[in-house]
Image: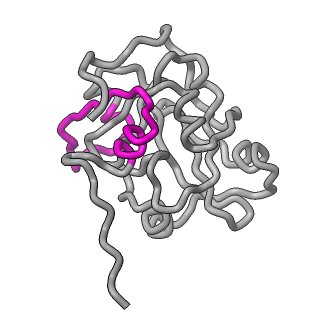
Amino acid sequence: MAKKPKKQQQPGGTPATVALTAAGTPFTVHSYDHDPASASYGEEAAEALGVSPDRVFKTLVAEVDGTLTVAVVPVAGTLDLKALASAIGGKRATMADPAAAERTTGYVRGGISPLGQRKRLRTVLDASARSHETICVSAGRRGLEVELSPADLASLTGAVFAEIGRGWTASQPARPAHPSPSGV
């Protein structure tokens, strides 16, 4: 049996940006030089982009009652595993094995995007996202973020909104990240 050809990607695109383009969703790509020595990918992104850490969201993969689930929370705080489990009617949540998260999403740790994953996982987006006109999430590679509306992110991923983050405080009203052309 012949091998299936790999999906062709747009030059410089990631599965996340290709999915956004295919859906016709407005978005802006922001890139920065990733420092491999950085202790926190999300905080590094917020600082490099000059965006408040409550507008930059990290994508975490957890296991809820044995099923991989995506949690998208502000980098300014942490994921409340009990709240995540509760949000989808589960009883127990733990962080997923990093290798399983990478294998299932098709992305590497520090570059996992909620968009364009190899296998679409159930997704929960922290309710704080609704207080912003736009938020930034990983575009599928370390040093690359995509800015879009929380409603568009929820629509494309099938996410539900729930209060799953903790340890952060909302800052100023939403402001876009550094202006740049939309799309890829």
- Among all residues in the image, which is located at the extreme front? 1
Above or below: residue 62 compared with residue 88: below
Residue shown at the point (41%, 26%) measured from the top left = 26
The residue nearer to you, when weighing 109 against 17, is: 17
Outermost residue to the top: 173
Whether residue 40 appears in this view of the structure is no
The spot of residue 72 in percent (x, y) is 55, 40
Q: Residue at x 74, y 63 (%)?
A: 65
| Rendered-image quadrant of the N terminus | bottom left
- Which quadrant of the rendered structure holds the C terminus? top left
The answer to which quarter of the image holds residue 125 is top right
x and y, in percent, of residue 156 in the image: 54, 40
Segment tinted magenta in the rendering: 16-45
Residue 167 located within the stretch drawn in magenta: no
Residue 35 falls within the magenta-colored stretch: yes
Q: Is residue 6 visible?
A: yes
Front residue of this view, candidates 158 and 76: 158
Q: Quadrant of residue 2?
A: bottom left
Q: Residue at x 61, y 24 (%)?
A: 128
Residue 39 at x, y percent in the picture:
33, 45
- Residue furthest bottom as drawn: 1
Determine whether 55 is above or below 57 in the image: above
Depicted 9 relative to depicted 75: above or below: below
Quick check: 16 above or below 76?
A: below
Left or right: 17, with 91 as reference point: left
